[in-house]
Amino acid sequence: MLSAKEVAEQYIELGEKKSGYPLYKMIGLAILAGIFIALASVASNTVSATVESGSIAKLLAGLVFPGGLIMVLCCGTELFTGDCLLVISLLKKKISLFRMLRCWFFVYIGNLIGSVIIAGLINMSGQLSFFNNELALTTIKVAVKKVSYTFSQGLAMGILCNILVCTAVIMAFSGKTLSDKVLGTFFPILLFILSGFEHCVANMYYIPSGMMALSNSEYVKMAVEHNIHIEKLNIGSFFINNLLPVTIGNIIGGAIFIGAFYWFLYLREEH
């Protein structure tokens, strides 16, 4: 496997390449990444829907969710949280701030498009009716919980999440075979799901899917019977209560705690 220094050195050129994609390719690859992460989110809700023990439910979700990032990395798509590592190329003066922010913006938009597409398809498919509508209840419950955090909670959980996600990216790049990359990705992502940390792209599925589920009167009735505060779930709470603090936290966790640290420790020119 490659050393941490070798991975950091490789990422300099990779960052140049990623930030230089034509717009159609950047957005297209980002839509695919959003789709992959959303499908992993679908699976994590599904596997935990009927599990009464919260910790066991988190563990089961954590065992399936890494498949999303594995698909992202092995299929060469673009994920906003992983692209926070572009700061390595920025600090090495290989790309401009504008180029990095351009990449972040359009990848973020592409991830959102891909995630919402899957949320729409899942709701159209009737998949949420699994287990006597228990999956719909779980989907709504998860979405409501995610829009109920305080700003500081969302920020902190976003930081913690992307420390682990970008660590998974670094570990995947250190591997030379497909099995190396899968194994390198798996454990950090398992830890982030098990710990309940917040990933802005995953939330682009979790929350819209919960919002869409409210269009079904049976699901709404079931949620009300379980004292779930569905009134908290709307577009404003999605963006302001969750995406805003979690995205800022993801940037801090990935760009500063991993990207900037790697540049400082392995790539900074000492005089």
Image: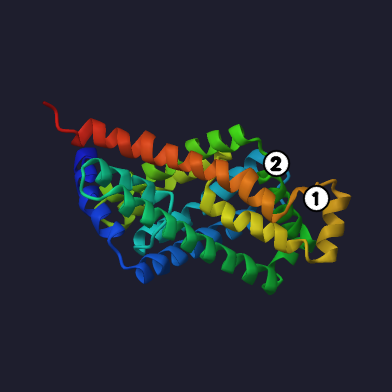
Identify the residue at image location x=35%, y=69%.
25
Residue 88 visible, this orientation: yes
Q: Identify residue type, mark 1.
A: Glu
Residue denoted by label 2: 148
Q: Position of residue 256 (x, y in %)?
A: 37, 36
Residue 57 visible, this orientation: no
Q: Is residue 108 left or right of residue 126?
A: left
Compared to 155, does 34 lie above or below?
Answer: below
Q: Earlier in the sequence, mark 2 or mark 1?
A: 2
Q: Is residue 154 left or right of residue 14?
A: right
Using a 10 Å C-alpha cutoff, classify the residue at mark 1 as few (fewer than 14 neighbours), some (14 to 19) or many (20 or more): few
Identify the residue at image location x=50%, y=65%.
35
Q: Farthest residue toward the top? A: 271
Q: Which image quadrant: the C terminus?
A: top left
Q: Position of residue 84 (x, y in %)?
A: 38, 46
Identify the residue at image location x=70%, y=44%.
145
Q: Farthest residue toward the bottom? A: 125
Q: Is residue 70 left or right of residue 34?
A: left
Identify the residue at image location x=42%, y=59%.
107
Residue denoted by label 1: 231
Using a 10 Å C-alpha cutoff, classify the residue at mark 2 as few (fewer than 14 neighbours), some (14 to 19) or many (20 or more): some
Label 2: state its secondary structure.
loop
Q: Position of residue 20 (x, y in %)?
A: 27, 61
Q: Quadrant of residue 235?
A: bottom right
Q: How many marks?
A: 2
Q: Identify residue type, mark 2.
A: Ser
Q: Position of residue 166 (x, y in %)?
A: 38, 44
Q: CA distance from mark 2 to mark 1?
A: 11 Å
Compared to 150, does 27 lie above or below?
Answer: below
Label 1: state its secondary structure.
helix
Q: Are marks 2 and 1 in contact (CB under 8 Å)?
A: no
Foreground residue among 100 and 168:
100
